[in-house]
Amino acid sequence: MGPSALWQDGEALEVAVEERGWPIPRRVRGQLRVVPELRGGSEHLLCAPGNHRWWPIAPRARVEVRFDDPAVSWSGTGYLDCNWGAEPLEQAFRSWTWSRAPLSRGAVVLYDVWPRQGARRAMALRFDGSGEPRAIELPPTVQLPPTLFRLPRETRSEADAALVRTLTDSHFYARSVVRSQLCGESVVGIHESLSLDRFRTGWAKLMLPFRMPRRAG
């Protein structure tokens, strides 16, 4: 991925980051180490034809971050997954929301997908280290405030949910920190909203080289 790289070192995933910041063009250089605490089992279909799949490789992991530029470091819980498909995402989906939250024992992942053909697909999976994840009853849908770009946001929660912080806000994608209640616990997790109807517009794609720049190694 340009001058950045990642590789597996025993049980850990090592990531070397060598990038340029945006919109301030400063150097971003450091290392991440991701150590799985739970394994995610097998892959899951995201749409009926089977053209797109999702694999929660490590639904709960220990993440260690050490950067030289800027000089920051921290550690905490994290997550690692993988998506792949036989066609561009915008050809198969209109939108989706996803969230992941750590539990006192394990983690829970929510996925709501709106395909271009067929019915909405929703998943609520609990991971507790016993092997394959266990499907749990879908919590009710809770509306969250839209983004500055008026991108709709919603999540699922057994009680009220609240937006804690927006981390990434763009025309077609938002990543946020959300407080909710899942599996009987009050949790704080990462949430994302993706509009592929917006993404497929020509001007949105023209912005990608500036939002996610890459250069030769």
Image (cartoon, rainbow, N blue to C red):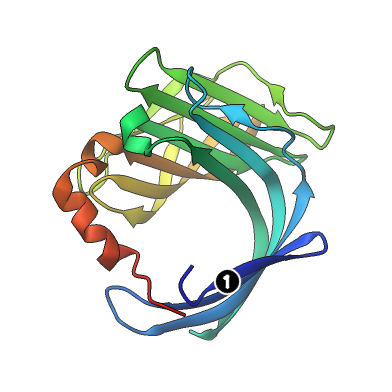
Instruction: Report the residue at 35% width, 47% height from top.
Output: 174
Left or right side of 26 for 61: right
Looking at the image, residue 26 lies above or below residue 34: below
Instruction: Report the residue at 69% width, 30% height from top.
Output: 126
| The image quarter in which residue 146 lies | top left
Q: Position of residue 213 (x, y in %)?
A: 34, 69
Looking at the image, residue 97 lies above or below residue 49: below
Q: Amino acid at mark 1?
A: Ala
| The image quarter in which residue 20 lies | bottom left
| The image quarter in which residue 215 lies | bottom left
Q: Nearer the viewer, residue 130 or 204?
A: 204
Q: Position of residue 9 (x, y in %)?
A: 78, 67
Q: Nearer the viewer, residue 134 or 138?
A: 134
Q: How many C-alpha atoms fall within 10 Å of the one at disc 1: few (<14), some, or many (≥20)? A: few
Left or right side of 204 for 80: right
Q: Position of residue 95 (x, y in %)?
A: 34, 31
Q: Nearer the viewer, residue 3 or 196?
A: 3
Instruction: Report the residue at 23% width, 48% height from top.
Output: 171
Looking at the image, residue 107 lies above or below residue 50: below
Which residue is outermost to the left? 203
Left or right side of 110 for 133: right
Q: Which residue is mark 1?
A: 5
Give SS at disc 1.
strand
Which residue is outermost to the top? 119
Instruction: Report the residue at 74% width, 39% height from top.
Output: 106
Q: Position of residue 29 (x, y in %)?
A: 51, 82
Left or right side of 192 for 67: right
